[in-house]
Image (spheres, coloured by chain):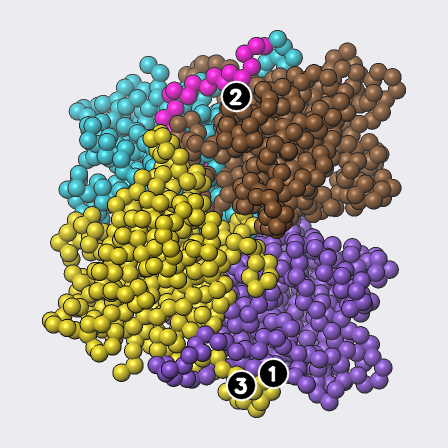
Chain colours: A brown, B cyan, C yellow, D purple
Amino acid sequence: MYRTDTFRIPMAGPADMTKLTALIEDGALDPMHIVALLVKTEGNGGVNDFTREYTSATLAATLAPYLRATHAEVERRIAIVVSGGTEGVLSPHATVFARTPVAGRAGTASKRLAIGTAATRDFLPHEIGRAAQIEATAAAVAAAMADAGISRAQDVHWVQVKCPLLTADRVRAARRAGHEPVTEIAYKSMAYSRGASALGVAVALGEIATPIAEDAVLSDWSLASAVASASAGIELKNNIVIVLGNAEGVGGDCVIAHAVMQDAIDAAAVLAALRQSGVQADVAARGGNSASTDAGDMRIDTSRIVQVLAKADPSPDGMVRGFRHTMLDDTDISATRHARAAVGGMIAGLIGCPAAFVSGGAEHQGPPGGGPVAVIARVSE
Amino acid sequence: MYRTDTFRIPMAGPADMTKLTALIEDGALDPMHIVALLVKTEGNGGVNDFTREYTSATLAATLAPYLRATHAEVERRIAIVVSGGTEGVLSPHATVFARTPVAGRAGTASKRLAIGTAATRDFLPHEIGRAAQIEATAAAVAAAMADAGISRAQDVHWVQVKCPLLTADRVRAARRAGHEPVTEIAYKSMAYSRGASALGVAVALGEIATPIAEDAVLSDWSLASAVASASAGIELKNNIVIVLGNAEGVGGDCVIAHAVMQDAIDAAAVLAALRQSGVQADVAARGGNSASTDAGDMRIDTSRIVQVLAKADPSPDGMVRGFRHTMLDDTDISATRHARAAVGGMIAGLIGCPAAFVSGGAEHQGPPGGGPVAVIARVSE
Amino acid sequence: MYRTDTFRIPMAGPADMTKLTALIEDGALDPMHIVALLVKTEGNGGVNDFTREYTSATLAATLAPYLRATHAEVERRIAIVVSGGTEGVLSPHATVFARTPVAGRAGTASKRLAIGTAATRDFLPHEIGRAAQIEATAAAVAAAMADAGISRAQDVHWVQVKCPLLTADRVRAARRAGHEPVTEIAYKSMAYSRGASALGVAVALGEIATPIAEDAVLSDWSLASAVASASAGIELKNNIVIVLGNAEGVGGDCVIAHAVMQDAIDAAAVLAALRQSGVQADVAARGGNSASTDAGDMRIDTSRIVQVLAKADPSPDGMVRGFRHTMLDDTDISATRHARAAVGGMIAGLIGCPAAFVSGGAEHQGPPGGGPVAVIARVSE
Amino acid sequence: MYRTDTFRIPMAGPADMTKLTALIEDGALDPMHIVALLVKTEGNGGVNDFTREYTSATLAATLAPYLRATHAEVERRIAIVVSGGTEGVLSPHATVFARTPVAGRAGTASKRLAIGTAATRDFLPHEIGRAAQIEATAAAVAAAMADAGISRAQDVHWVQVKCPLLTADRVRAARRAGHEPVTEIAYKSMAYSRGASALGVAVALGEIATPIAEDAVLSDWSLASAVASASAGIELKNNIVIVLGNAEGVGGDCVIAHAVMQDAIDAAAVLAALRQSGVQADVAARGGNSASTDAGDMRIDTSRIVQVLAKADPSPDGMVRGFRHTMLDDTDISATRHARAAVGGMIAGLIGCPAAFVSGGAEHQGPPGGGPVAVIARVSE
């Protein structure tokens, strides 16, 4: 079996590999053991966000000599998911997951953070947002669970999917090949790709009944996964899947837990995920007009928090808790950028750290306007 | 004396007066008693945010017949402060403050929410961001305190200032008149105007020693007010000042309290202000790995919260809690928009409502990167 | 009959009525004779561009006392079309069209600029972008031609349509009423509304065969009008139509001509329209390596140009003259803003004036990526 | 001596090297002879435009094996200037300049396009925008002229400079070192860096008298170069200089000429530069109401145009030909993006090609609001 090690490292720019190489050079991280990289870059997170491919390419180029592999081999061996958009207080960073082989049954008595990865084949442009993407993603999730050593769906707490999008070029290619893509608008294709990917996760985990009608994508919002997180990017043509959960027999000092935010301001769900992960966090009833003198101390035990992962979504009905939001009607700032900034601000406030992994576009990932949130935390010994 | 009534009403657009006229027509609000209007509109909050003047003009046109006054007279009688920018989850709305005269000493034994207003003279373009603006603002704060019936500085919990900015036109006018304005960049002039206004508040409340060197504006960040909130707009040439505090002898069922956010993710300060206002809110230590089953219940007593007012600021040193933020280096989205979205998300999460008054640009309003936050709450009887 | 007078006046902001009232107060313009106002404002031209309704409302309020009419009556009597977006060098301005009654047959021997207006009924949200909007627009164009005194389609050189869009609110209203709107994306609804309006113009002028399949909107790009210009805005629910052409018997010193830009850089079409309108403008072959010393003199006779009207469109195939453009894939700036800036720069360069009326979104208005351009010019006597 | 070869190649993205490697693999371009690369990428051209460094890094990585050199050596041998921003119709592309050695005196009787490059040392953050940058740039221009084989300043028609900017990080570094940088605003630092670089060019070419007062940068607009083009980027710390001119004894079939646009709509200057370069282009007086039937033929001989280089600038006085522009007051789109879109549209219209090299920010490069424009054209034999 193996031990899961998690490192969160700040990045000074999309190509800043300083902290990653320092971890390696210092001996803290064996590059051969890296299985996944989850990165937030400071691009716009939209169609023309080239920071994603820039970071991916730089990661591959940096790790290639360590792995004695070509860039392409690095990208096949390591699941690299780069999500653009650090609006508001969010801070560019990478989360590195490594699996260190250990002799015999490595784990403690209780379950520990486990990780597995898989990838689908490349999709043709017209397959994006449709059944082919749903099915291939479901199969990849099953493969990643097996890779992680997780056998039960309820032990899966986060499934990160990186998926492709349609550019004007790809739309033309599809049409030349006689296939009409699901949309011709690049920005909209990101939503379709994320939506189909999330439904694939839900299928794999038994969260929704199958078969799914293809036109349910971006249409039947009752279908959703509570742990899927999909992020679309121009830099790939297939889906890459990372499964995070807890498994017996796995080593390390971390566990993962999750909750589902019902809307973009669901602080209670974040606190619930923190508690489920073992982090002390509670908002209790206490005297309002009391003589309390310690007002202002927030005693969430942030020291145990390794990373928080969350989705941000502009509620498609234009409302949050009965109040109108303006994210969908803003021609100057895309709705996803608005949503990441808001959810990022809330989570950073609760965990006392702006380097959370908040990714935009939560179609079929939790309820409309909400989304999954997961906490990776160190266990108390 | 008087009783202070506070109404928060949603707006479907910058010119939506539906709820305001409904309050009046239903008899809930006597238009003759309105003393101040604090509005958040969905403009960009920047130089070319015309929603501010559009809303101001529409408010004046709507109230003029009720007050049997000209538009200009309405604007002189009622302090109208419109702040642009409802990024992220923030929701366009207006907060209406009315003072209803009551016979004799209206108040309860304890202090209640009090409000007073004042205005400075029009500033010449080159006076913006300089000593003339500081001094005139300080005098207006004193006048507004007297108007409110507040005698002690420590009873003041929020001073809202609306202040002018420099457009390319006004810069040219200043130069034609032989005066070099403090900056020729319109967006930057908003910062200067807010900064000088905040220092004026600090002078009036004795928060900083006088005299202040004129070049301290946007330079000596140790000088700040803990209760100032300044918002710049193209639609006016003078400063309008609204003082909110608690005063004996004033009636009504609300009180106000404040705290100072030390940075843009200072949730503890928001909770502190909630508690100081009498709202039950606490984040207590409780067992992490306990058998707690009520995870996810956040028991802040939101029913008593009438309004939360806060400033949002992109930390000028580029860092939040030791992590780099990217707000200052984004050429596509202005830093103030980023900051409002993030702080708005955090506050909405904590109070369970996205219709908070979060205004951007907190120069000399709390510490750099932070800002004041105030809570108006109904008292428990 | 009547004489057509045209005034182009700069605006210092969306509510700047200085030049308009000066024209009236100076006696140059009789407000009772104003039939149409074509305005470019400095909003973003997108969904949340409130400058359009702000300018419309201010125009109505300004003219109401002159016309001894209510605001609503002003808007019914005068066709007010406000188009947002003065990207690049474009300059906010208004073009005022007035019809002065003259005794008997006012006109000269030759045709002169004629103008007529009409309006459709209000549309239900689900009618936008569909057959109902096409048909009602066609009927309104016929009515406006009759109003102008133009009997033949070939004498029509510009048909300006202002049309509504779908907001999140209106989408919800449609669905509550059991009707699915043509799109739920506000920004996309602007394209549908413009497209259906343009097809309505084409139907009225016999440019395309009828009936049109409803799903031809934004789909069959072979259908287009050579003179339609549609602009969508949040501030109205019906279509307003202004027909500009030449007619015998009409007085004044202006004529109008048009050409169709085949793409966004079709300077030749602009020159052709200039020449057709009688303005001297030619790009002739002349010696390259000659000893010419007058290099740099551009001798277009700009003094006769009263106004240029044009559409700007981001080519939907992503290409301009075989080169890729990036307008459609930019998540930070909407494609319409890009296109207006580029076409506005080209036209301003050719006519030596940045106050042209360049409006975005040319769906079914000329070929994809191109659009109509019209020139109103003073005739030489 | 040498022969200058120029290739303009489209790019499908910041890392698209397809056409470059095709030129090399096809034998049309010997990679050992490349001296300079001038690239337009589709980033925002602002502070956080990472496409510039991404393209630079990819170019170095692509050429390194061909040159049997490290990436750093490639960047030292080849002057790589990447300018972000293809707003409007502008199309991402690269212009490759190669010098092929030829035996003896290669040139024809007349002068031909010559090119030379040089680089300054790295600047400290506080040197940017100040005398140190001016002086080092002037020296580099002289070195690049010598490298090109150009002895007289009047034979220089374009000097491209790539220069660094200040990020929040670099500002902090400067202050830690006890030096106050010229500005703390990253976006503004780009203007300072471009301005000082342009003044350096002007000094080298004798266009302005020396010494220059350091505070003339961004202040004394009477000082300017007619051939400088500076572009700031986050990806370098020194200035890279490329001199383009005509020289005797140099081979090849191209020449270069330039003119100075007096404002952003100066089409006459573009036509003048075309004619000076030998391209047939003229706007002649011809009958307006004539019976001309060839209206619309624009007979600029575009087949000889190899590349057009130009600067775009938002006029700092807020006016273009007496009309107000709104570029400087737009909080949503940076002024440089506006200006590139407009000037790019005009030039593309005149030359019939959207792949022109239009770069933003023309401080001290031509008059305020204008800028240099140069044409590289094939000579007629």
**Span colored in magenta:** B292-311
Residue A268 marker: 2
User: Does the residue at mark 1 contact the one at mark 2 (Cβ under 8 Å)?
Assistant: no
Disc number at residue C286?
3
For disc 3, the neighbor class at 10 Å (few under 14, some 14 to 19, many from 20) is: some
Secondary structure of the residue carrying tag 3 is: loop
What amino acid does circle 2 point to?
Answer: Ala
Real-space CA distance between mark 1 and mark 2, rounded to the nearest whole angstrom: 72 Å
Q: Is residue A240 magenta?
A: no
Q: Quadrant of residue D300?
A: bottom right
Q: Is residue C47 visible?
A: no
Is residue B308 in the magenta section? Answer: yes
Report the Cα–Cα distance between label 3 and label 1.
10 Å
- Label 1 and label 2 in one chain: no
- Circle 1 is placed at which residue position? D278
Front residue of D280/D139: it is D280
Helix, strand or loop for disc 2: helix
- Which callout, 3 or 2, points to the residue nearer the camera? 3
Image location (x, y in percent) of residue A253: 75, 20
- In the rendered image, the residue lying farthest to the top is B291
Rendered location of residue C143, percent (x, y):
23, 56
Q: Which amino acid is tagged 1?
A: Gly
Query: Between tags 1 and 2, which lies in front?
Result: 1
**Image point (30%, 21%), residue name:** B253
Quadrant placement of the N terminus of chain B: top left
- Residue type, mark 3 in image: Arg
